[in-house]
Amino acid sequence: MADAVEEYLVQLIMATRTPAKHDAELAEWISYGASPRGSIALDRCARAHAWLAGRDFVSPEDIQAVLFDVLRHRLILTFEAEAAGIDQDRVVQRILDVVAVA
């Protein structure tokens, strides 16, 4: 995996762990972010997605394609976010919006 793509993956995960550094709204929505196993799962799923597409390299699009499925069940939202009707998919989309692509 190229260094820039790996850094993009790390920044996506870090946005779940320290959301205040990335976006104030994320900080209000996320109670607990992805664990280290979430990082590993995202890496492996992105590699598998690239391989299934016939490529021997991972692109940011591969990471984005599997991000929702990898993170959806790994995020614990705040009570306020749940009360406001915010779901994990909206949070993951917001992460994609605020983290710059490599």
Image (cartoon, rainbow, N blue to C red):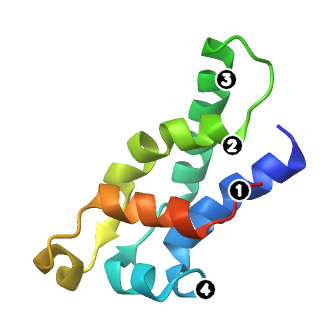
Residue annotated with mark 1: 101
Please tell me in which quadrant of the rendered image residue 93 appears: bottom left
Residue type at mark 4? Answer: Lys
Residue annotated with mark 2: 60
Residue 56 lies, in percent from the top left, at 80, 19
Q: Give the camera-side residue of 41 and 49.
A: 49
Please tell me in which quadrant of the rendered image residue 63 appears: top right
Q: Is residue 65 above or below residue 24?
A: above
Mark 4 and mark 3 in contact? Answer it, CB < 8 Å: no
Residue annotated with mark 3: 50
For marks 4 and 3 on the same chain, the one whose residue lies earlier in the sequence? 4
How far is the residue under mark 1 from the one under mark 4?
17 Å
Q: Which mark is residue 21?
A: 4
How far is the residue under mark 1 from the one under mark 2?
7 Å
Q: Is residue 94 above or below residue 3?
A: below
For marks 1 and 2 on the same chain, the one whose residue lies earlier in the sequence? 2
Direction from residue 18 to residue 57 in the image, left or right: right
Residue 47 lies, in percent from the top left, at 67, 28
Residue type at mark 2? Answer: Pro
Q: Which of the two marks, 4 or 2, is nearer to us in this view?
A: 2
Q: Give the camera-side residue of 3 and 60.
A: 60
Q: Is residue 52 above or below residue 30?
A: above
Direction from residue 32 to residue 45 in the image, left or right: right
How far is the residue under mark 4 from the one under mark 2?
21 Å
Q: Which mark is residue 92?
A: none
Dot 4 falls on a residue whose secondary structure is helix
For marks 3 and 1 on the same chain, the one whose residue lies earlier in the sequence? 3
Mark 1 and mark 2 in contact? Answer it, CB < 8 Å: yes
Direction from residue 45 to residue 75 in the image, left or right: left
Direction from residue 13 to residue 55 in the image, left or right: right
Q: Which of the two marks, 3 or 1, is nearer to us in this view?
A: 1
For marks 1 and 4 on the same chain, the one whose residue lies earlier in the sequence? 4
